[in-house]
Amino acid sequence: MNFVDEWSAFWRLFYTNGGYKRVFSEGLKNTVVIAVLGLLIGIVIGTLIAAVKVMPKYKALPRVLNGVCNVYVGFFRGTPIVVQLLLAYYVLFPLMGISLGSLNTCILIFGLNSGAYVSEIMRAGIQSVDAGQMEAGRALGLGFYPTMLKIVIPQAIKNILPTMGNEFIALIKDTSVVSFVAAVDLYKVFTEMGNVNYEYLAPYLMMALIYIALIMLITLLFKLLEKQLHRDDRT
Amino acid sequence: MSSMKTAQSNPTPAMNNDELIVIRGLCKSFPIGKKKTLNVLNNVDCVIHKNEKIAVIGPSGSGKSTFLRCLNCMEDPTGGSIFFNGEDLADMKVDINKHREHIGMVFQQFNLFNNKTVLQNIMLAPVYLKTKKAGGIFAKPAVKKQIKDEARETAMNLLRRIGLEEKANAYPSTLSGGQKQRIAIVRALAMNPEVMLFDEPTSALDPEMVGEVLDLIRELADEGMTMVIVTHEMGFAREVADRVLFMDGGKITEEAPPAELFGNPQNPRTKEFLSKVL
């Protein structure tokens, strides 16, 4: 079979027989949902961990929290996400009697995983903000947390936005392993399409195009966001 | 030496009415490496009276900035006491934030909040702290609005005073150094502080902008604001200060009214320093 025939066979599956509906309503949707919710959970967890890491460590509690965070980051950065997905879906959750469903498990694990990475990005971002900003807030009588939240973190986010865009793009592409735990994403949908004729070239080419389009869109969104956040710079 | 002071510190001394800050045996050391410590302040005693203008001068590394930064615990003292409003600020159990509201501080590097406009810079702390006292997020919307309106009015009045009202909605990155420092000063003033600490307020400025900042500080001095100024501007110290402290090696080695200290210094180290800078 030459490429033209292969492509037209795929096109029949993809367009004429309505395969694209499943691509968009399940594959693309799940890929985006897992990555977006994963990143949002990751930002929340990452910010909390980063805050713990930059907390003054006079008292016992911050030190204990710091230890807990180190273990957490160590585990989630030290193991591949496939291992984390398999462990959660086939071992931990069944043992604990929790059944979240494969999509929710993926969202949760991607969130926890990206939390570990975002925490390091955030910490670097927070430390990139001039220490004088924190001092000025504290000198006015604001506490550590209000100053962090109102002054330091907004500036940190501006600094780390390009890195955060990278993390989001990596996350999108990492979602291609979720079929390990029976979740349906772009990879799964296109593989199934290939399985029909045992011809994978055209479906995977199409999949690559969709990933590229998606990531170009995200790059554009982050650029716009960056522009918006940099409005307080000298023009 | 124990690293951090705890509660069993000296009782509050009977303070005279005109004593605002009483510093007793203030020590500050920084750890260098595992065993060594660097003693920056050694047993500093000082009393700051209400309405008094104190200039702190001395060679670099003499501990004058650290001394100033200990007064509002930007650096935690490692020994001694700082009594302010009946509490020992060096005591780690004291709520330092409460006291910092009444101690304004101006930094060498201005430290305006880069992500806020000039107006927001001035309003942020008063609005946040007053709203917090009124119940935080549970405060009534009308109360919140009133706090905000009052803070905006105060801020605009302060900006008008320094002639920068048209910069209210500008971001700090668009301002000159002198403008930034004057805004940093009124940001501290917006809290209505009892004392202002100036940490080399003109050292990071272009020479032509030093004047406008010193003029504003002079104005505050004339209005009776209590202030402690760490400075290298000897002429300014001489003109504005009621008392000049000369620091060397983590100690106040000489203190006197400016005319005396500059005109007839007693300590050989003071003489040497003044001969170099004057």
Image (cartoon, helix red, strand yellow):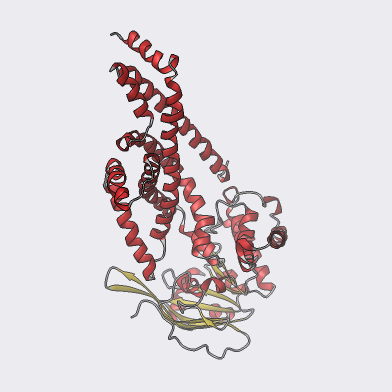
Residue A15 appears at what percent x and percent y? 44, 16
Residue B44 seen in the figure: yes
**Residue at image point 55% right, 52% down:** B114
Question: Which sits in the foreground, B264 or B203?
Answer: B203
Side of B153 where B42 appears, left or right: left
Question: Which sits in the foreground, B40 or A107?
Answer: A107
Side of A145 where B163 appears, left or right: right
Quarter placement of the N terminus of chain A: top left
Residue B185 seen in the figure: no
**Residue farthest toward the front in the current orientation of the protein:** A97
Report the label total.
Answer: 0
**Residue at image point 34% right, 57% down:** A69
Question: Which sits in the foreground, B275 or B79?
Answer: B79
Quarter placement of the C terminus of chain A: top right
The answer to which image quadrant residue A216 occupies is top left
Residue B272 appears at what percent x and percent y? 44, 75
Does B149 sit above or below residue B254? above
**Residue at image point 45% right, 42% down:** A37
**Residue farthest toward the bottom in the current orientation of the protein:** B14
Does B226 sit above or below residue A65? below
Residue B2 appears at what percent x and percent y? 34, 80
Residue B125 appears at what percent x and percent y? 60, 62
